[in-house]
């Protein structure tokens, strides 16, 4: 039977260039290099190897992977075919696309969100990576494939094997240039000229393109709702906090809110002061006790430059910071008033201690081991020793955190009172309150 011409895959021409994709400078430079080398087959002939057949762009949702793929097609001056959604489960259609791409080669095929899951015969399942790998194997070498996914691990190894998707490129969260682009776009609307753009750019670290588009609309709607003529910095920050942490909670919705806010103020003050003293290189943007749907208070860190490596000292200091919230509340209200508010802190602290002694080789007594390589064989190896060392680390961190809380109690109380009065304390104000004090100590040899 003849194929329906109307349903045959058709090539597209991209009008999107790398200049249209904000941020991702290093990714774009890498893609430009790949374009240059795939257009020179003689480079590979010299090494007696085949031309690369494709690449995988992986990273979080809404960071521009699809736009980068189309910009690649534009910069390479290649027609492209796009396969997405349910079509990724239709291997016959995929074969048709690659047949058409071969006829129009050199060309490009974009497999968008290849880590999508589909409901087949009542079961959620992955795309058939092995079937697509076979298609790539049999396809003209002048058809180049770009696949996108959220993670590298979610794509089958058969597809990332040599001579399939040879280049594996991570597209991380929006960088500072990209975030500044979105804020500049928002501020094309009537706004207070006193808005500190760089401050807002720091606050939106970690937000996706979709969230930033929503931020612009929410800021406008809130400005109109308040009867104001311009977007203010206060409105922008409140909308950012809503997206990140949820809406402010009505006071009537929280039992004994005044008591709750007071204890939350001391809890967050403990985290903030000890973090400033022990980890001054990790900048704090704000400390707040404004109750929101996702939290009753938080310390917001600027995660623009996350640590790529962490020392034993930094890890132990972080443990002291994590435990400080609970310790401060116990000092203020007594241990009999202990509540569930520190559950996330305790969970993170427990995880870090276990990782330090079992996988990072940081414990003096257990030594340079990684228990993960042994547990598949036996889950009892060093079990009692690990428990002993785990509790020792926890008690030691608790003791040091308590010492610091006692030593800097006056500063913690001043910050807590400011939070009760103002609900929010900015990072700059926090630094002034703490002053130039730093807390450094050698780790106990028992660790």
Image (tube, grey):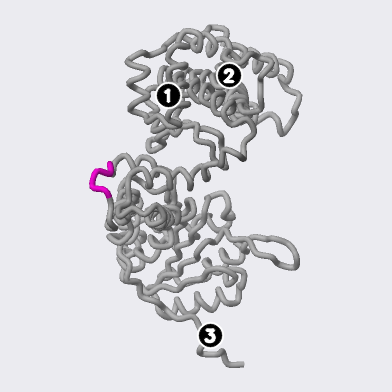
**Mark positioned earlier in the residue sequence (3 or 2):** 3
Q: Residue sitting at 46 percent across and 21 percent down?
A: 417
Q: Nearer the viewer, residue 429 or 88?
A: 429
* The residue stretch that appears in magenta: 192-196
Q: Nearer the viewer, residue 330 or 100?
A: 330
The crowding category of the residue bearing disc 1, from other C-alpha atoms within 10 Å (few below 14, some 14 to 19, many at least 20), is some
| Element assignment for label 3 | helix
Percent x, y of residue 331:
58, 13
Is residue 308 among the parts visible in the rendering? no
Where is residue 200 shown, x and y percent of the image?
Answer: 34, 43
Q: Where is the C terminus found, in terms of image quarters?
A: top right
- In front: mark 2 or mark 1? 1
- Residue on which the image places disc 1: 418
Q: Is residue 280 above or below residue 40?
A: above
- In terms of secondary structure, where does tag 1 sit? helix
The residue under the point 42% across, 15% down is 411
The residue lying furthest to the bottom in this view is 1
Element marked by disc 2: helix
C-alpha span from label 2 to label 1: 16 Å
Identify the mark nearer the N-term, 3 or 1: 3
Which mark sits nearer the N-terminus, 2 or 1?
2
Which residue, given by chain and number where applicable, does mark 3 sit on? 7
Circle 2 residue: 329
Question: Left or right of 103: which side holds 401?
Answer: right
* Mark nearer the viewer, 3 or 2: 2
Q: Residues within 10 Å of mark 3 (few under 14, many from 20)?
A: few
Magenta span main SS: loop
């Amino acid at each position: 039977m003849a194929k329906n011409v109307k349903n045959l895959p058709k090539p597209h021409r991209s009008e999107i260039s790398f200049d249209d994709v904000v941020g991702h400078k290093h990714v774009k430079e890498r893609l430009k290099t790949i374009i240059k080398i795939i257009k020179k087959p003689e480079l590979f002939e010299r090494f007696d190897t085949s031309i690369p057949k494709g690449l995988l762009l992986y990273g979080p949702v809404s960071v521009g992977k699809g736009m980068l793929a189309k910009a690649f097609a534009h910069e390479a001056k290649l027609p492209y075919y796009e396969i997405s959604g349910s079509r990724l489960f239709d291997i016959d259609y995929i074969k048709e696309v690659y047949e058409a791409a071969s006829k129009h080669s050199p060309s490009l095929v974009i497999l968008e969100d290849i880590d999508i899951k589909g409901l087949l015969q009542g079961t959620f399942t992955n795309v058939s990576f092995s079937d697509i790998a076979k298609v790539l194997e049999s396809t003209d070498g002048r058809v180049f494939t770009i696949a996108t996914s959220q993670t590298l691990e979610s794509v089958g190894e058969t597809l990332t094997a040599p001579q399939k998707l040879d280049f594996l490129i991570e597209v991380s969260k929006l960088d500072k240039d990209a975030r500044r682009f979105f804020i500049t776009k928002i501020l094309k609307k009537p706004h207070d000229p006193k808005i500190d753009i760089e401050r807002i750019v720091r606050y939106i670290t970690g937000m996706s393109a979709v969230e930033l588009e929503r931020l612009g609309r929410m800021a406008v709607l809130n400005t109109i709702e308040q009867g104001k003529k311009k977007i203010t910095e206060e409105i922008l920050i409140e909308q950012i906090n809503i997206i990140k942490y949820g809406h402010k909670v009505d006071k009537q919705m929280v039992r004994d809110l005044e008591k709750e806010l007071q204890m939350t103020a001391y809890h967050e003050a403990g985290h903030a002061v000890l973090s400033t003293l022990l980890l001054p290189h990790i900048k704090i943007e704000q400390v707040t006790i404004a109750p929101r749907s996702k939290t009753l208070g938080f310390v917001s860190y600027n995660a623009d430059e996350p640590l790529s490596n962490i020392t034993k000292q930094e890890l132990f200091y972080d443990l002291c910071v994590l435990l400080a919230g609970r310790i401060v509340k116990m000092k203020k209200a007594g241990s009999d008033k202990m509540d569930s508010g520190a559950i996330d802190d305790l969970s993170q602290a427990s995880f870090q201690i276990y990782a330090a002694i079992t996988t990072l080789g940081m414990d003096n007594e257990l030594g340079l081991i990684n228990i993960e390589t042994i547990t598949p064989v036996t889950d009892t190896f060093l079990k009692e020793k690990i428990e002993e060392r785990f509790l020792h680390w926890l008690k030691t961190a608790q003791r040091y955190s308590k010492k610091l809380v006692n030593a800097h109690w006056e500063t913690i109380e001043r910050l807590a009172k400011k939070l009760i009065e103002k609900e929010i304390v900015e990072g700059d104000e926090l630094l002034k309150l703490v002053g130039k004090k730093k807390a450094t100590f050698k780790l106990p040899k028992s660790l």
